[in-house]
């Protein structure tokens, strides 16, 4: 009795009860497709998160910010507590060998601009030249904010490709033009020196495209110019980021900088100190969250597959009972127990395998529905497909074994007498 | 009519355990010897032990005590797998209710015992076609059992029983579910197999007329052989 014959036999018996076979498969289809769907969506998400993470410097990125001391006596910040421009400069000098680039942003402010009788809402960011490394953007025409702009408090700005197209038809046309902004009631004229666009792939770029103007209305100006427009002489920040050179130990670097800053500027502060976070720790937090999510999903998927498997077992038991007489005849004709057992196991495996394959296809399709909507596609890893196929086969064997064994152990005399 | 014995039974006892302390003895020590090429019928009223005896002859069941040698093999010593091999190679079953496998074409039904014997696909279908020709069912090869009449089904079943060229054909009331005309047809096939191919056939029946057509009649009553005579030999004991 070879495998091919068994498979043919299994298919003919499934054909005889099409409806029943399909309903039984449904349990497996739903289980497997939900696993694959979630794996596909997870892949889309993870790729996007990794995109952002890597575009910002990956594990070379370290962030510093002010935080409350453990024994803080206040629960609010004051301007004196903020990180001064001077401090960042000192850090840059002292740790020059380790640092690739420092990026700062003095926050954002809403601004508006009147252009051809149309009011445009914008968000203005005061940044330093290094900030481009954090903003997931790249300059496609002109230049970014330079040290010179910062020094001279230059009235320059960098706008998005979308804004440039909207205002002047193309990024090239926009360069050198002067825009009149209204910020906090004061208006100022800024010259467009550069055009940026988002350098993102996958989900994030789709989201940016969908968001349209809401994302593309960011205008970058020197942080010194920003302070000038805000009428502050005291330039300070809540946080700053450092991209360290390759080969520098991020953890060691970060704690050194933190200790340096705390010793020098925050020792006497009653409530505030510097705190740091490395890209590595951010990433491990992220993967921890991902891990929890995938564990929860696995458990849910496991339960649904268990339910599907019980359905298969149930139907196989019905099938064995229905075919008791046939089993008796087969035994009388010389079928050994093993042949009967494998006949039913193969039938159960085929139900699960077909269900599994349909489930995989359905899962990829459903997982990509979201992807199609936002314009990005993803396929689950080959590994997860192989896993799903072998898992559904394993369900077939596991839940098919008991009914098959029952069939194999039937007494041929009793079975032949069965009405 | 004599030859090498195909069936040799000595002191066959079969009892069923139906809870302490009772044991129900169905067969009380039967001695039967059937030589190769004999067409023998076993007759008896219901409850006489016919079916139990048939199950033992057919290697579906084992005797409680006594010795059963089938074509030179001591059946009592075999395990389940070996018994299934014996059923497959040595015995061709023909049942009262045909017992063709549903949703399986006539020719596939005939091939089934060869499938379990591990015969290659090509050879299976070649042999099955020959067998269908023997029972004059060649034109129905691809028909499903539910498309066949009772007589046709039984002819397919006989072809199936012959598939592995068994030592004996064991037919249990093969005409019981058929009208007399088709029953006649089926009996003619048995006679043909017996005469032309020299098959050893054991016919289990409660119909004395059918039994009278065979070489030898063994009569069972209450688990004992009460008559064993060669047909036409006026009650001659074997």
Image (tube, coloured by chain):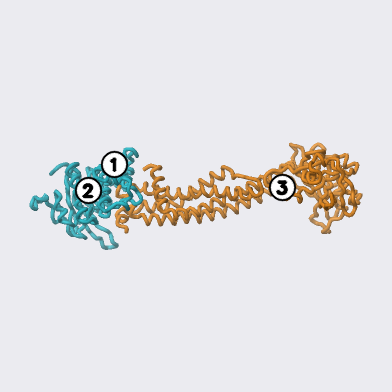
Q: Secondary structure at mark 3?
A: helix
Label 1, residues with CA under 10 Å away: few <14, some 14-19, many ≥20:
some
Disc number placed over residue A209 in the picture, else none: 3
Is residue A113 at all visible to an observer of this figure?
no
Disc number placed over residue B68 in the picture, else none: 2
- A401, A149: nearer the viewer: A149
Please state the chain letter of the residue tagged with numbered disc 3 in the rendered image.
Answer: A
Which chain appears cyan?
B
Note whether A93 is above or below B62 in the view shown. Answer: above
| Image coords of residue A49 (percent x, y) | 69, 46
Question: In terms of image quadrants, where is residue B179?
Answer: bottom left
Residue position for label 1: B129
* Disc 3/disc 1 C-alpha distance (Å): 70 Å
Q: Colour of chain A?
A: orange
State the residue lying farthest toward the front. Answer: A116
| Image coords of residue A86 (percent x, y) | 88, 45
**In the visual, does A402 lie left or right of B208?**
right
| Image coords of residue A240 (percent x, y) | 81, 46
Label 2, residues with CA under 10 Å away: few <14, some 14-19, many ≥20:
many
- B142, B157: nearer the viewer: B142
Same chain shared by disc 2 and disc 3: no
Label 3, residues with CA under 10 Å away: few <14, some 14-19, many ≥20:
some
* Disc 2/disc 1 C-alpha distance (Å): 34 Å
- B221, A67: nearer the viewer: B221
Disc number placed over residue B190 in the picture, else none: none
């Amino acid at each position: 009795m070879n495998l091919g014959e068994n498979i043919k036999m299994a298919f003919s018996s499934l054909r005889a009860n099409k409806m029943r076979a399909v309903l039984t498969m449904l349990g497996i289809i739903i289980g497997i497709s939900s696993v694959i769907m979630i794996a596909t969506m997870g892949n889309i998400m993870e790729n996007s998160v990794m995109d952002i993470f890597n575009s910002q410097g990956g594990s070379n990125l370290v962030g510093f910010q002010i935080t409350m001391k453990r024994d803080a006596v206040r629960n609010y910040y004051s301007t004196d507590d903020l990180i001064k421009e001077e401090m960042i400069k000192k850090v840059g000098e002292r740790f020059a060998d380790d640092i690739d680039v420092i990026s700062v942003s003095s926050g954002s402010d809403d601004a508006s601009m009147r252009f051809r009788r149309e009011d445009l809402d914008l968000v203005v960011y005061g940044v330093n030249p290094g900030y481009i490394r954090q903003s997931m953007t790249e300059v496609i025409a002109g230049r970014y904010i330079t040290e010179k702009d910062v020094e001279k408090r230059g009235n320059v700005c960098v706008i998005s490709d979308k804004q440039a197209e909207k205002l002047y038809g193309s990024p090239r046309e926009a360069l050198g033009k002067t825009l009149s902004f209204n910020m906090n009631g004061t208006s100022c004229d800024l010259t467009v020196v550069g055009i940026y666009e988002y350098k993102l792939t996958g989900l994030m770029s789709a989201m940016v495209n969908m968001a349209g103007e809401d994302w593309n209305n960011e205008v970058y100006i020197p942080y010194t110019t920003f302070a000038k427009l805000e009428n502050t002489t005291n330039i300070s920040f809540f946080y700053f980021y450092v991209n360290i050179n390759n080969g520098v130990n991020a953890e060691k670097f970060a704690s050194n900088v933190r200790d340096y800053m705390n010793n020098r500027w925050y020792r006497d502060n009653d409530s505030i100190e510097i705190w740091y976070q490395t890209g590595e720790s951010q990433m491990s937090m992220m993967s921890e969250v991902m891990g929890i999510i995938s564990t929860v999903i696995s458990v849910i998927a496991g339960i649904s597959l268990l339910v599907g498997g019980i359905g298969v077992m149930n139907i196989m038991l019905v099938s064995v009972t229905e075919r008791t007489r046939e089993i008796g005849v087969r035994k009388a004709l010389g079928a050994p127990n093993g042949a009967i057992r494998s006949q039913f196991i193969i039938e159960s495996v085929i139900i699960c395998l077909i269900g599994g394959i349909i489930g995989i296809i359905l899962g990829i399709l459903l997982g990509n529905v979201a992807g199609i909507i936002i314009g990005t596609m993803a396929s689950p890893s080959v590994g997860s497909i192989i896993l799903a196929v072998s898992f559904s086969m394993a369900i077939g064997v596991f839940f098919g074994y008991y009914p098959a064994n029952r069939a194999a152990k039937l007494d041929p005399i009793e079975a032949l007498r069965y009405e | 009519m004599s030859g090498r014995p195909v069936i040799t039974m000595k002191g066959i006892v079969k009892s069923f355990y139906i809870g302490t302390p009772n044991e129900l003895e169905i067969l009380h020590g039967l001695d039967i010897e059937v030589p190769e090429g004999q067409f023998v019928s076993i007759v008896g009223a219901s409850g006489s032990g016919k079916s139990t005896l048939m199950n033992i002859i057919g290697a579906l069941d084992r005797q409680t005590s006594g010795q059963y040698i089938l074509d030179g093999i001591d059946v009592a010593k075999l395990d389940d797998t070996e018994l299934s091999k014996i059923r497959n190679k040595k015995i061709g079953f023909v049942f009262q209710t045909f017992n063709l496998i549903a949703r399986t074409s006539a020719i596939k039904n005939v091939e089934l015992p060869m499938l379990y014997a591990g015969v290659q696909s090509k050879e299976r279908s070649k042999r099955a076609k020959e067998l269908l020709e023997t029972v004059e069912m060649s034109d129905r090869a691809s028909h499903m059992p539910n498309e066949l009449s009772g007589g046709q089904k039984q002819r397919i079943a006989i072809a199936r029983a012959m598939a592995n060229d068994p030592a004996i054909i064991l037919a249990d009331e093969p005409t019981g579910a058929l009208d007399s005309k088709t029953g006649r047809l089926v009996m003619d096939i048995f006679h043909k197999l017996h005469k032309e191919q020299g098959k050893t056939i054991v016919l289990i029946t409660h119909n004395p007329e059918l039994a009278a057509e065979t070489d030898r009649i063994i009569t069972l009553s209450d688990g004992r052989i009460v008559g064993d005579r060669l047909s036409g030999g006026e009650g001659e004991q074997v």
